[in-house]
């Protein structure tokens, strides 16, 4: 009987493991052009199914359906992994323009029903006859024929906003070329905004998008949230980009004309755009802390019954979406007899295309010094609601604190409350009894002005003060020369960044490695040449280095480092040897620059 029970448990475990490995999924394109044929693949893994039920493919026509099966075997560390697939291929034709959501498909496996996820499809209109490839060149930066068209657009979610209201900025690459590779780029500086970058997938992928009546392959190069810091019209300057575009050239071959691929460099600029920033309406509440968005407020307290000189922590939590990182802390009004310390602030936010959302936690630590009963008033927090375009005020609850007298010697004090009278505070250490015991009194020594020790009390502080003034003036003069200070500290700051890059190099984190090296080089050149980052570009860095006194070989070396770092974000994965070589080259270039004497 025991043997059968063990066998039954084993079979149940195997069946459960098998069921966990069975899944049903759908895959296919997300965008198609009207009139185009495409395929959706419904794949059942590690099982054989029946009674397949497909959804209604609205806007499309089913042309035919086929089924295929396969088996794959992989061996990893001696472990054999076998997987079977049963794929139902549905060939459709996109008949009607629009956006559609296909319901899940279902299939039966040994009495169990498995379903796929829903599938969203966008059917784009076909190219309009005579449509311009991306509009006028002044707006799109288009260059090349239709099959190699390439241009960049800076797209804003809003062009008229309130101050501190978030704007989604997306920089898009449009092309009809078969292959595109980035060589260098310079994104807009977004002057007048606080920028919050949105994380994008490491590998840039293309999808179809219809623009000005033409269908292009579109890829998002950068996406960020902009928070305007001043009112009025703010102009976003164009970005500059260089790409290698794959084209085809007809050449005479042994069997006649043939198309041969070749790369052509293209330099394009994104469009300039502007935003009208409106000031926030008047009538701001006294508790307005600069919040713009949609928020909620909650509070909690560590204890409402403590002894004198014991700490109490009051926590405020602001949740929602908006400019959480740039809020002022709510004003907390505490009783006069409470010692208060600077609050501890923790901001946890996540930036996405929908805005910045997260939590701002503010912890106030206070210590009551007297015994008695006290009230901590409700905390008010006002913000400007974007949807209703009105100020809204949130309130926490009011807390009543009971403070008992502290232990003897802890400095505890008592408070007695009298109606219509001031509070009477009795301190247990301010009046002492008269001493009755015999006291030993000692006569203070007499000081003579003719002794050397007397004059040293005046001479030493005077000399120390004069030395302090001289040193302080020299230090203040040196600190006032900001450019000189940055120049002196340029190597130290760059070394710190390169140290961080070295950590990413050891971890084979290529994306962060190249980003950290690029920041180190740009920051070093900015400090060393005495120019802000916004005024340094690849076009003028050579001229500035030459003015400083750098040789042509060193200038070429810096330009090569910048180009390799920028290129790495769009080029195929770089080898570890290339990263080691770039790191060594950067350290040597900065070392050579340190030995260069300024003209």
Image (cartoon, rainbow, N blue to C red):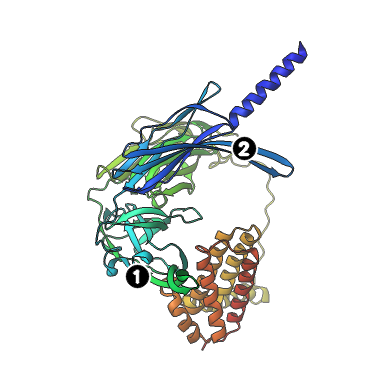
Give the SS element for disc 2: strand
Q: Residues within 10 Å of mark 2 (few under 14, many from 20)?
A: some
17 vs 125, left or right, is right
Give the quarter of the figure containing the N terminus. Answer: top right
Residue at the disc numbered 1: 143
Along the polypeptide, which appears first: circle 1 or circle 2? Answer: 2
Residue 83's label in the rendered image is: 2
544 vs 129, left or right, is right
408 vs 151, left or right, is right
Residue positioned 56% across, 82% down in the render:
554
From the viewer's side, name the closer residue of 467 and 425: 467
**x and y percent of residue 387 in the render?**
27, 43
Which residue lies most toward the top here? 1
From the viewer's side, name the closer residue of 293 and 133: 133
Mark 1 or 2: the one toward you? 2
Task: Estimate the spatial distance between the alpha carbons at disc 1 and disc 2, rounded to whole Å.
Answer: 48 Å
**x and y percent of residue 506 in the render?**
66, 60
Q: Is residue 559 above or below residue 373?
A: below
Residue positioned 32% across, 52% down in the render:
165
**x and y percent of residue 129 in the render?**
24, 59
Q: Are marks 1 and 2 in contact (CB under 8 Å)?
A: no
């Amino acid at each position: 009987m025991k043997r059968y029970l063990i066998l039954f448990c084993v079979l149940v475990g195997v069946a459960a493991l098998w069921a966990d490995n069975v899944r049903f999924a759908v895959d296919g394109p997300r965008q198609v052009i009207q009139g185009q044929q495409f395929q959706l693949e419904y794949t059942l893994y590690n099982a054989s199914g029946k009674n397949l039920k497909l959804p209604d493919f609205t806007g499309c026509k089913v042309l035919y359906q086929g089924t295929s099966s396969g088996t794959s075997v992989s061996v990893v560390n001696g472990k054999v992994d076998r997987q079977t697939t049963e794929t139902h291929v549905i060939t459709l034709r996109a008949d009607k323009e629009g956006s559609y959501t296909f319901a899940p498909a279902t299939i039966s496996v040994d009495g169990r029903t498995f379903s796929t996820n829903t599938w969203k499809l966008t059917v784009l209109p076909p190219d309009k006859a005579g449509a311009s490839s991306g509009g006028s060149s002044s707006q799109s930066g288009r260059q090349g024929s239709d099959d190699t068209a390439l241009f960049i657009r800076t797209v804003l979610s809003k062009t008229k906003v309130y101050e501190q209201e978030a704007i989604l900025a997306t920089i898009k690459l449009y092309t009809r070329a078969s292959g595109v590779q980035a060589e260098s780029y310079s994104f807009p500086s977004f002057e007048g905004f606080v920028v919050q970058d949105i994380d994008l997938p490491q590998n840039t992928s293309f999808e179809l998008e219809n623009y000005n009546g033409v269908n292009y392959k579109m890829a998002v190069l950068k996406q960020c949230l902009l928070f305007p810091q001043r009112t009025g019209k703010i102009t976003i300057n164009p970005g500059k980009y260089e790409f290698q575009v794959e084209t085809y050239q007809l050449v005479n071959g042994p069997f006649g004309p043939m198309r041969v691929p070749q790369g052509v460099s293209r330099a394009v600029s994104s469009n300039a755009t502007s935003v009208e920033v409106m000031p926030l309406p008047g009538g701001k509440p006294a508790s307005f802390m600069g919040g713009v968005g949609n928020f909620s407020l909650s509070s909690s307290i560590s204890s409402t019954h403590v002894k004198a000189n014991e700490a109490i922590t009051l926590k405020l939590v602001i949740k929602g979406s908006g400019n959480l990182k740039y809020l002022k802390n709510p004003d907390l009004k505490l009783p006069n007899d409470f010692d208060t310390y600077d609050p501890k602030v923790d901001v946890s936010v996540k930036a996405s295309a929908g805005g910045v959302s997260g939590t701002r936690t503010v912890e106030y630590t206070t210590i009551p010094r007297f015994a008695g009963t006290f009230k901590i008033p409700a905390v008010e927090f006002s913000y400007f609601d974007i949807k209703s375009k009105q100020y809204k005020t949130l309130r926490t609850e009011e807390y009543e604190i009971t403070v008992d007298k502290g232990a003897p010697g802890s400095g505890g004090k008592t408070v007695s409350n009298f109606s219509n009278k001031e509070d009477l505070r009795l301190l247990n250490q301010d009046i002492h009894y008269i001493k009755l015991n015999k006291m030993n009194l000692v006569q203070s020594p007499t000081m003579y002005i003719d002794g050397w020790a007397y004059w040293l009390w005046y001479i030493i502080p005077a000399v120390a003060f004069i030395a302090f003034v001289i040193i302080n003036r020299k230090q203040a003069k040196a600190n006032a020369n900001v450019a000189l200070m940055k120049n002196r500290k340029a190597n130290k700051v760059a070394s710190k960044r390169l140290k961080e890059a070295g950590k990413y190099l050891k971890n084979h984190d290529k994306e962060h490695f190249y980003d950290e090296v690029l920041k180190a080089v740009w920051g070093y050149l900015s400090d060393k040449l005495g120019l802000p980052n916004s005024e340094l570009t690849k076009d003028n860095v050579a001229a500035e280095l030459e003015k400083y006194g750098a040789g042509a070989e060193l200038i070429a070396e810096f330009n090569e480092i910048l180009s390799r770092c920028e290129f790495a974000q769009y080029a195929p994965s770089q080898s570890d040897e290339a990263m080691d070589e770039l790191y060594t080259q950067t350290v040597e270039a900065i070392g050579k620059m340190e030995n260069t004497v300024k003209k």
